[in-house]
Amino acid sequence: MPISDRSFRIYVEENLDALNRDPDSEVLVHQGRRVTAGEFRSLVLRMARALRDRGVGRDTTVTLLSGNLPETIAARYAANLAGARINHLYNKLSADSQAAIVRDVETRALIVDPRLAERAAELVELAPVPDVLVLGPAKLGTDLLELAAGQSDEPLAAASRPDDICTIRHTGGTTGHPKGICTTFEQARWFSGALPDFEGVKHRQLVCTTLAHGAGYMADTVLHSGGTVVLLDDFDAGEALATIERERITSMFLLPPLLYQLMDHPDRPATDTSSLRTVTYGGCQASPARLADAVRTFGPVLVQGYGQNEAGGVSVLSAEDHDPERPDRLRSAGKVLDDVEVVIRDESGRDLPPGEHGEVCVRSTMIMQGYWKQPELTAEVLRDGWLHTGDVGFLDDEGYLTLVDRIKDMIVVVGGHVYTTELEDLLNSHPEVLQSAVYGVRDADRMERVHATVVRTPGSDLDAERLCAMVREARGAMYEPARITFVDALPLTDVGKPDKKELRRRAEESGAAV
């Protein structure tokens, strides 16, 4: 029976109703464990009651420090059902950065993966919280699963209101005061939108990136559809390929660097990936040359989604638009969504015509309510109903949006601006380059210099001189890197983006910019 007959129902209630339609179906898989819809639904309801008894409810924040466990999703659902807002920490942040976030969001309860108990102990020393609840037995805190076992799994109406904050997501928190992006329960329903229908195919999603990022919210949609979510603890290309074949995976989300690793893994040619129907990618710029390779490798299954935590979804490049013979189209972020408005503006706020570069500004019902308790910063990016994304891009005559850089990543050099993604695209077009990252490093005179870090194809002896000559010929001396370094793999952030802050730090430490 429905959990509530209120006119507004949060995404958790809708998903619990969907799970109740076929209680015996398999909905979550993790390390050999197979959880049915009925078991998961029961756990959410029991856990929500246990959290309420611990004082979790409306106007409180629950912070998750957890990996990719079925119980992690259950804890998020339970806290939201109890009326609380959720903050999910990225596990690979430093303890100091995590502590800053825990304090910032005024954490009422910290829910901990037992495998992260040592980090949790370090964290609560830096940022004490009223309650520490663990997803299983541990030396620290109280076992939330044990508390939940003693509760009823009868239907429970959500305590939330449409305009209550559902999630607070942080844009990094690695330096300075973290920026918490607030999304309401009404807006959260957008993240569990419709899945494409494939005749005779039941959705089976592989989650091999953190549940704190895009894959976690895509999982909501799969669960709502009656599908199955298969969880890996972290991304490993070989393990991901084996899981795709074994579990007959139909969909997955990857950051572009991880997609490249999947393509380049030696097991890939012998792995059956024919079950894949949708490989969604996004989160950072992708190389048109590598995307063309991916289409040839996996077939017409790639879909790019462009959006921000601040803006929600903005545009989509469909599977049909992924034409290997159209690198200009592969370079774009796709067409703007029907219920989203996008304009390109210059520094004075003037709307620019198609083809001209400027800041991407967005207006829709999905833009954030603001940054958590930072009204001045909110006012900087939210002006007259428009979100100023900080992305530089342009619209073409057909309505396709192309991004060329982040304003803060654009390198100011003598003679103009170097757009890092344009230079990365050029470097990646070399047949002996697998991946590159371009970033600015200040020299002793505080002038920015163009640096590039490059991953070569196996066995390549490509050197910096040849790449610089290619850049000079194609784009002129302004785009020529002052230094090119070669690595076996780019460092990645917790969500799988190239870590340009780390690359910049390495360059500064080595004295390369002097």
Image (cartoon, helix red, strand yellow):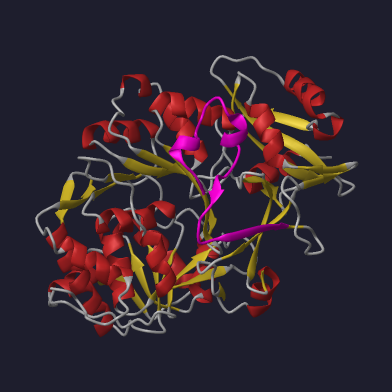
Quadrant assignment, res 378: bottom right
Along the line of sight, the residue nearer the viewer: 208 or 307: 307
Q: Residue placed at 45% from the left, 41% from the top?
A: 303
Mark yes or no: residue 398 visible.
Answer: yes
Q: Is 216 part of what is drawn in magenta? A: no
What residue is drawn where x is 41% and y is 67%? 188
Q: Where is residue 123? Give x, y as percent.
A: 45, 67
Report x, y in % for residue 164.
43, 80
Residue 306 lies left or right of residue 280; in this view the side is: right
Residue 126: % across, % down: 50, 71
Q: Is residue 431 above or below residue 453?
A: above
Left or right: 339, with 379 as reference point: left
Q: Nearer the viewer, residue 210 or 66?
A: 210
Quadrant of residue 333 within the rendered picture: top right
Q: Is residue 135 left or right of residue 181?
A: left
Q: How many numbered marks are there?
A: 0
- Residue sitting at 54 percent across and 64 percent down? 96
Quadrant of the image containing the C terminus: top right
Residue 490, percent across and down? 57, 36
Most extreme residue toward the front, as rendered? 397
Which span of residues is magenta-colored? 316-344
Residue 301, relative to residue 271: is it above or below?
below
**Between 34 and 203, which is closer to the camera in this rendering?**
203
Answer yes or no: is residue 139 visible.
Answer: no
* Residue 138 horizontal side relative to residue 321, left or right: left
Rendered-image quadrant of the N terminus: bottom left
